[in-house]
Amino acid sequence: MKRTFLVQAFTSLAVALLAMVQAQATPQSIPNGPWIQDQQSVRLEAFTSMDELQKKLFNIYARSKGRMQVEIAGETTLGFPIYLVKFGDADPGKIKVLIQAQIHGNEPLGAEVLLAIVQHLATGGNPETDEILDQLAIWIIPRINPEGATYAVDNDVIQRRVNEQEWTPEDWGLTEGDPSPWYHYAGPAYDPPGYDINRDFNSDLDFVLGPANAGLLPGNSVSPGFFVTPEARTVRDAYKELMPDVFIDVHQRGTNLMSEEDNSMCTLQVLAQAVEPWSLDPNVLDFSKQISAYVYQRLGERGNSPFTNIQRYPYVNLPGSALGALSLNGSAIMLYEVRTAKQKSIGMLAKQVVIGLTETLKGLADGSIDYIDPADYEDIPLAGPRIGNPHF
């Protein structure tokens, strides 16, 4: 039976997201790319603000009839709350799923998508929703990086990748001369300075930076992170409490062509491993591949549409990323990398992720993911050529 859970109720979200972008110019025609055109305005403030996020979450909670809980799981350096939505406790009898988004502040679509997922899990009244909540414990962090999401210049929200945080070696018992982690950005382009939170994770969930391990600083892209940001520690703490079977991270990136021969745009890239494959439990890697392959196949069933323009994310070895570090703790992973959402297709891109996440939850609940051959992951086309920004 074809699954339509959440999709029927998605129209209003898609319309709202489409209204976020006001275009006054013809988009790049070849290959009809996503770049902002002359005289084109993108109203980032139309995305959910922090005040609105709180209101929406607690309004959904009030209508959830006890299905969900909302917690402030942590706070950023500037005091922004990091919200955690819980559907169920850390029940060992259930499949446990942790989903997060907007760890990079300038990737806002994921938070909107996860709000839609929260709303329909909390208020949906159909057997499919009931089965998901009966079989799964689902915890959701819709926005990990409030500081990057709300970053403004002259009161104009422009967002940025990193948080707002100084390197404070004294907080870790270190000396002023100890170098900052390599993923701390400062200088004219980063004023105030901040961290790329998605490089601040460590597979040792109890790691604490201090004099005994200061020699690991500054590290590099293929080294673990140091848990120096409150945001990464918040995710770490939620992870330790739930110990999920599946961890899903929603991101955005630039745009790729489908291939050298096909200049249509990739809408979504997926990934099943974020560290060297030999370092992973083979069962964890296989389960990760099954999940990505399952989503690819379910979206592919929708025929000749942009939903089928899916690729495998390029190979990475990032043990300091959330996906990398947490997969080393036994969680199957899936990365959603959505095409840059600054054009009229934003509603379609959001809908694609909502469908993909919905199918993932259903496939976990009814066991259909278990029947996917991990080798099917290799059927997902490799990433095609990147589209360069014509304005540079």
Image (cartoon, rainbow, N blue to C red):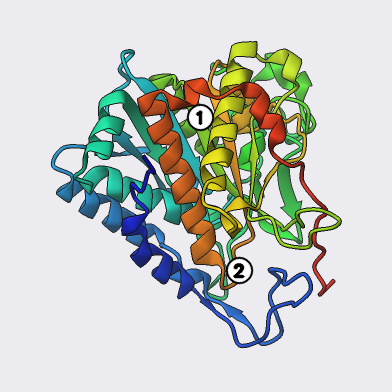
Q: Relative to residue 357, is residue 157 drawn left or right? A: right
Query: What secondary structure is found at the residue carrying circle 1?
Result: strand
Residue 243, percent across and down?
44, 19
The residue depicted at 68 percent of the width and 84 percent of the height is 26
Q: Who is closer to the viewer here, 173 or 83?
A: 83
Q: Who is closer to the viewer here, 135 or 273?
A: 135
Q: Amino acid at mark 1?
A: Phe
Quarter of the image where one finds residue 273: top right
The residue depicted at 54 percent of the width and 65 percent of the height is 346
Task: Identify the residue position indicated by label 2 in the image.
Answer: 342
Relative to 321, does residue 165 appear above or below in the rendering?
below
Residue 1, percent across and down?
36, 39
Relative to 57, does residue 169 appear above or below in the rendering?
above
Task: Answer whether residue 369 is visible to the viewer in this image.
Answer: yes
Q: Who is closer to the viewer here, 144 or 351?
A: 351
Task: Identify the residue position indicated by label 1 in the image.
Answer: 247
